[in-house]
Image: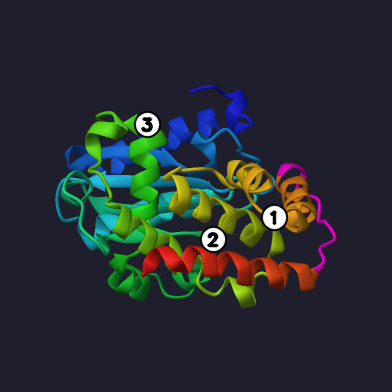
Amino acid sequence: MNGGELGGYSAFLNEYVSECVRIFGQALSGVYLHGSAVMGCFNPKKSDIDIIVAVKEDISDEIKRQFMEMTVAMNERAPAKGIEVSVVKAEVCSTFVYPTPFELHFSTGTLDWYRRDPDEYIAKMNGTDKDLAAHFAVIKSRGRSLYGIPADEAFDRVSREDYIDSIWYDIENARYDITEDAMYYALNLARVLAFCNEGLLLSKKEGGEWGKNHLPERFHGLLDAALAEYASAEPQSYDMELADDYADFMLEKIGAFRK
């Protein structure tokens, strides 16, 4: 892996994979990288490290605890937004299931829960996650195998219908959420519409650039500000009335593809 594209986090990923091998042993099927780290727009000030760990069999609570302790410890050395990782069965990667079952999940947003009650966390942090459809589609198209067979061989194709449902789940409340995170929703809505219109699997940066080439000119300033914030991690000034208008416009366009 090119160290430059991950801002020096290549050694970190190598260590994370080694720890997965140590903890899961023969049950480990693969470790796969997705998100900004494989899309050429990783920024340690704004990005997390997105990982899928595939296992061949059920894993015990003790193994889950070891994995969580390792991940929480390494999260201290991760980029600002930390590690986001889901442990899934290899069988749901190779024969896709939607909504997708997962065995365990961790992100900085769940860290307090784990620290407060690790037993409850390990018992309850499982189920299905619609977001995994979008992650799997990106892995198959642009992901990287850190351990195991190549990503495009390990992952089944995600149908257009399942992918659109998955990404809609992430942006359906953008009309309200854009006031809290204008950068995220401005870029994410653009990349969602790019998929709906052209079948493109884009990063947030690529989505913003696509939007400037395909969306009405009145939204270009909003996208410029979002792209500048994404690149620099420096807060930008947004016209929130315009942002609301943009969210309404984009949700109407995207929603038409769900009918």
> In this view of the protein, which residue sits in the foreground, 58 or 134?
134
Q: Is residue 227 magenta?
A: no
Q: What is the distance, in whole Å, between disc 2 and disc 1 at their CAs?
A: 36 Å
Query: Quadrant of the rendered structure where residue 123 is?
Result: bottom left
Check the image and name the residue furthest to the right. 237
Task: Please report whichever mark, 2 or 3, sits nearer to the chain's N-terminal start.
Answer: 2
Q: Position of residue 112 (x, y in %)?
A: 53, 70
Q: How is the image coloured?
A: rainbow
**What kind of residue is marked 3?**
Leu
**What kind of residue is marked 1?**
Pro
Q: Are marks 2 and 1 in contact (CB under 8 Å)?
A: no
Q: Position of residue 51 (x, y in %)?
A: 41, 45
Q: With 28 as the anchor, is 57 left or right in this view?
A: left
Secondary structure of the residue carrying tag 2 is helix
Q: With 111 as the anchor, is 184 left or right in this view?
A: right
Which residue is tagged 3?
A: 146
Q: What is the distance, in whole Å, between disc 3 and disc 1 at their CAs?
A: 40 Å
Main SS of the magenta part reads: loop
Residue at horizontal 57 percent and vertical 24 percent from the top: 3
Secondary structure of the residue carrying tag 3 is strand
Bounds of the magenta span? Answer: 231-239
Which residue is tagged 1?
A: 216
Which residue is tagged 2?
A: 108
Task: Please report whichever mark, 2 or 1, sits nearer to the chain's N-terminal start.
Answer: 2
Residue at horizontal 32 percent and vertical 60 percent from the top: 104
Task: Please report whichever mark, 3 or 1, sits nearer to the chain's N-terminal start.
Answer: 3
Can residue 143 be seen at all in this image of the molecule?
Answer: no
Residue at horizontal 81 percent and vertical 63 percent from the top: 238
